[in-house]
Image (cartoon, grey):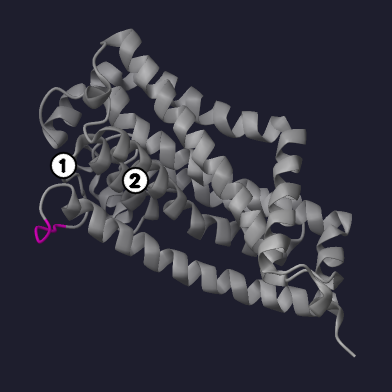
């Protein structure tokens, strides 16, 4: 007698079914997508208007040359978008748990890995769309304020823009894992949101996101050295300016922007693996308990 799981459609088809389900949920709940974009756009507009002139000197001293605060800030906002998208991942899982869909998926013939892989792919697609929107919006702001070609905005051109999107995805994985762990641990939307937001906003402001680290207090610089957002922002910023922008690790082995990208990607990759392993452990434990 074969088990029910053997009668499934296969991993790829099951992944597609779950991907489509989560994409439909996203379309039917535009408030979440709108809010997750509106918040970073507000940061981008308000920070450039309020701090643009004040921060100009410090930024030029760090990056070199005449640098617009818009181009300095956009990589940080792209990482913020990835962070917010990762935050909502755990909330979506809690909704599935509360509605009973989580348990139904576990006892269905679907591959359990495909259930979570499909969900993750939907979040990756959302991050791609949102980061592209932020990059385009930043370019519009620059055109309205100073004008210039696209390569004046992103020095590395279209490939650099694609690289920033890839950095956003890489960065989001560890916080997505953390968000889902919180969801499985609390099984409550409010508790999950509190847990991730308590971590999210301090990390943003205790990093190189909004101002160069050398213009911030020493204790902030110390925390930033261990802050994942610093590595995500520095990597995106290196692609933006086409040069080394690493603020917490001195690397000279690779040359140019690669002195930032290589260590930043290594740190984020290691963090993704560590948090991903924790998430897989909690998922396996939760699915075993729920399946019984």
Q: Which mark is residue 243?
A: 1
- Please determine whether, in this image, residue 147 is positioned above or below residue 204: above
User: Who's the residue at 30% across and 39% down the image?
Assistant: 159
Q: Is residue 70 shown left or right of residue 242?
A: right
Q: Which mark is residue 95?
A: none
Which of 258 and 48 lies nearest the eye of the viewer? 258
Which secondary structure, mark 1? loop
Q: Quadrant for residue 50, please give it.
A: top left
Q: Neighbour class for label 2 at 10 Å: few (<14), some, many (≥20)?
A: many
Which quadrant is home to the N terminus? Answer: bottom right
Q: Can see residue 197?
A: no
User: Who's the residue at 56% across and 61% down the image?
Assistant: 177
Q: Neighbour class for label 1 at 10 Å: few (<14), some, many (≥20)?
A: many
Which secondary structure, mark 2? loop
Figure disc tally: 2
Q: Quadrant for residue 56, please give it.
A: top left
Q: Position of residue 19 (x, y in %)?
A: 68, 52
Which of 143 and 57 lies nearest the eye of the viewer? 143
The question of residue 252 being in magenta is answered with yes
- Please determine whether, in this image, residue 80 is positioned above or below residue 282: above
Which of 52 and 83 lies nearest the eye of the viewer? 83
Q: Is residue 152 shown left or right of residue 224?
A: left
Q: Position of residue 118 (x, y in %)?
A: 66, 57
Q: Main secondary structure of the magenta part?
A: loop
Q: Position of residue 30 (x, y in %)?
A: 71, 31
Residue for badge 2? 207
Task: Give the Cα distance between marks 2 and 1.
Answer: 19 Å
User: Who's the residue at 53% across and 68% down the image?
Assistant: 276
Q: Can see residue 112?
A: yes
Q: Quadrant for residue 248, please give it.
A: bottom left
Q: Give the residues drawn in magenta, as a range.
A: 250-254
């Amino acid at each position: 007698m074969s088990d029910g799981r053997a009668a499934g459609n296969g991993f790829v088809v099951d992944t597609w079914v779950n991907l489509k389900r989560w994409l439909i949920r996203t379309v039917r709940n535009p408030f979440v997508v709108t809010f997750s974009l509106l918040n970073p756009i507000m940061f981008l507009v308000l920070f450039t208007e309020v701090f643009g002139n004040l921060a100009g000197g410090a930024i030029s001293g760090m990056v070199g040359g005449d640098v617009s605060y818009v181009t300095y800030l956009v990589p940080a906002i792209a990482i913020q978008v990835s962070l917010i998208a990762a935050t909502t991942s755990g909330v979506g899982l809690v909704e599935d748990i509360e509605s009973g869909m989580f348990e139904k998926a576990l006892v269905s013939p679907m591959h359990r890995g495909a259930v979570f892989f499909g969900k993750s792919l939907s979040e990756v697609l959302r991050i791609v769309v949102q980061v592209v929107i932020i990059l385009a919006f930043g370019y519009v702001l620059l055109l309205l304020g100073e004008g210039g070609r696209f390569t004046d905005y992103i020095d590395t051109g279209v490939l650099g823009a694609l690289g920033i999107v890839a950095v956003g995805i890489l960065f989001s994985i560890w916080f997505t894992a953390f968000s889902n762990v919180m969801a499985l641990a609390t099984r409550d939307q409010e508790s999950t949101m509190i847990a991730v937001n308590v971590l999210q906003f301090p990390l943003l402001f205790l990093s190189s996101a909004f101002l160069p680290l050398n213009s911030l207090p020493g204790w902030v610089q110390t925390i930033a050295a261990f802050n994942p957002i610093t590595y995500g922002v520095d990597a995106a910023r290196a692609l933006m300016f086409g040069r080394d922008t690493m603020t917490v690790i001195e690397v000279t082995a690779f040359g140019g922007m690669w002195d930032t990208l290589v260590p930043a990607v290594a740190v984020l990759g290691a963090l993704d693996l560590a948090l991903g392993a924790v998430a897989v452990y909690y998922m396996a434990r939760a699915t075993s308990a729920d399946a019984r």
